[in-house]
Amino acid sequence: MSLLQELQAGKLHDFHGGIHPPERKAPANQSPIADAGLPDELVLQIRQHIGQPARLRVKVGDSVLKGERLTDPDNPMMMPVHAPTSGIISAIERRPLCHPSGLEGDCIILTPDSKDEWRPRYPMTDIHTMDADVLLQRIHESGITGLGGAGFPSHIKLRPRKKAIEVLIINGVECEPYISADDRLMREHADDILAGVGILQHIVQPGLTVIAVEDNKPEALAALREANRSEQILVVSVPTKYPSGGEKQLIEVLTGKQVPRNGLPADIGIVVQNVGTAFAVKRAVLDDEPLIQRVVTLAGEGFGQKCNAWVRIGTPVRHLLKRFDFVPGPEPRIIMGGPMMGFTLHTAAAPVIKGSNCILAPGSHELAPPAAEQPCIRCSQCADACPASLLPQQLYWHARANEHDKLNSHHLFDCIECGACAWVCPSQIPLVQYYRVAKADIRQAQREAEQAEQAKKRFEARQARLEREKAERQARQQKAAAERKARMKEQVDAGGEDPVAAALARVKARKQAEGTDDMAAARAARKEEARRNRERKAAEAAPPAAADDKKSAVAAAVARAKARKAAQAAETSEPATPADTPADDKKAAVAAAVARAKARKAAQAAEQAGAAPAEAPAEKPAETSDDDKKAAIRAAVARAKARKAAAANSNTKTEDES
């Protein structure tokens, strides 16, 4: 029995676990889709999807038209952001994000000009003559991501795979309480949804297409069945059970197949898309309208008007609160998403993004604030409710202990974060929050490990490159050296001078010359240093002299100076008349020698008197000075007589010879 026959016969399957929380979809789903209006400014997050943020193509002060692309994708996992209306780019700055963390991120601030003027549009008419790649490119350029909440790029899921796609499932289940955006969209725009389904069929080429809708939406089922005119499309009603709208759970309900662990639906030949995504694909391909608005449910007792509304992407939440008469209660809370998988906003300045399907403002008795966490009582209700057949209790313990290996062994990443375990927990443990933090920690650790591995590879590649360059450099040097040797050998063989030997000889001669000068300078320096050391040691060894010793030394120095002056005067004086006889010459020479000896003795005595120790009695300066003078005079007279005698002898010899 084929899948088509089983579905036509009403045969469905079931998944493990699941819960039945209160639906509370009324009164928001009772009125037609309203218009949320145009806010004073639009805050467009640059990254609104799973993947990398696209590259900016606008700057502050630019004028843009409605539908104009504000960012450019550089790879398939980047999704562009478009202008929801015409206006001026007033800022590009960090603003609070639509995220559970409440952190700030890069945003484009667009100030509308109230003209709402479109850029030129180029709709496609006959899609059946176009290749799938052309349609996928249009979907990518239109910035369409999964509108069910995950935000995965739609063109990636629709891209052809190795395995042929057997079943295309259009998800219209919308099982979470309060949310009715897809319900109203199916009621009011069934034709557009089916047109988008036709485009998806042309891209994927499935054997069977199934539109699944929960049985608590009879109006939507009727509208789709009435608009469906294709035998290849089957509209199926599935039982109301949370979370039957999950991708893997819906596949199991319709086909009985389970997506393999760590696998994708495409691995078993199935592709799943949301009804809102099909509607956006129709607008993008046939109308050339990028994803710039979506239907958002406004529910909860805090809203005076509970409805679904067309909201432009980037509209601040505070604008919607004001537009739909929000009345804060005693403990006001604003939840982005439903009560099961949504998160509390930290500020109403956060904008609506492509994956925002509901803004919930519950009263305290409608959705009680989180109660105090109690210890786990091991009741196993969480395991019974888990639709992924996991062990939430074990995951909870390992998450608290940061045991990443055990979390991976217990398949933490198979958790779809539906919140069923936390809903049934009698101890009020926020299990999903623990799982989200643990997933973030594991992803961060994986990124760091990948970065470390990449750094290691870069380092090893650099080392290999350096070694290779070193080897190449050495090879070049060796080759050049061999060439030089060959040239020199040829030169020597031809009778020329060996340039290497000549260069070595010049270097050796220069070193020797430098060495001789250096040695002489070194010897002079050593002598000067020795002289200074002797003077320093003598000065250190001499005892301090008293006042009388200083006077004696001064007198001796004066005497020595006078004796030297007298000797110099005697040497420079005019020669006297020569002596009459040789006998007189001899006597004069002897007297001169005696005088010189006495002069030397007097000089030595004067030096000894100047260097006498402090204890020796000092002689009278006057007496010493008179003796020195007499000795110096006698020495001078003797030297003069000797010179005269020598001159007379020389003259006599000259006369005799003549």
Image (spheres, rainbow, N blue to C red):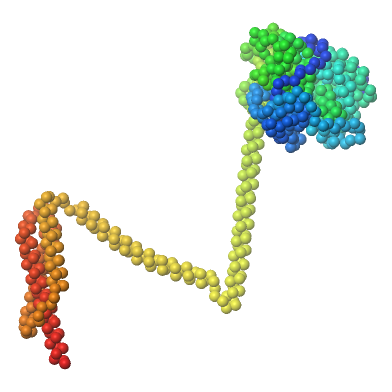
Residue at 7%, 75% (x, y): give it: 591
- What residue sits 13% from the left and 71% below the top? 570
Q: Is residue 456 above or below residue 305?
A: below
Image quarter of the C terminus: bottom left
Q: Is residue 461 visible?
A: yes
The image quadrant that residue 372 belongs to is top right
Q: Is residue 567 left or right of residue 220?
A: left
Q: Quadrant of residue 68?
A: top right
Against 451, residue 435 (above or below) is: above
Residue at the spot 85% in from the left edge and 28% down from the top edge: 287
Percent across and percent down for residue 14 are 82, 18
In this view, the residue in front, 127 or 510, is 127
| Closest to the observer, 610 or 165 | 610
Residue farthest along the bottom direction in this orientation: 658
Quadrant housing the N terminus? top right
Camera-nearest residue between 432 and 560? 560
Question: Which residue is rendered at x = 83% and y = 16% of the image?
Answer: 184
Q: Would residue 609 appear left or right of 81 to someone viewing this image?
A: left
Task: Locate residue 568, reporting x and y percent.
Answer: 15, 69
Q: Position of residue 276 (x, y in %)?
A: 81, 23
Q: What is the count of numbered marks? A: 0
The answer to whether any part of residue 598 appears in the image is: no
Observer-nearest of 357 and 405: 357
126 w.r.t. 244: above or below: below
Extreme-top residue of the structure: 365
Residue 50 occupies quadrant: top right
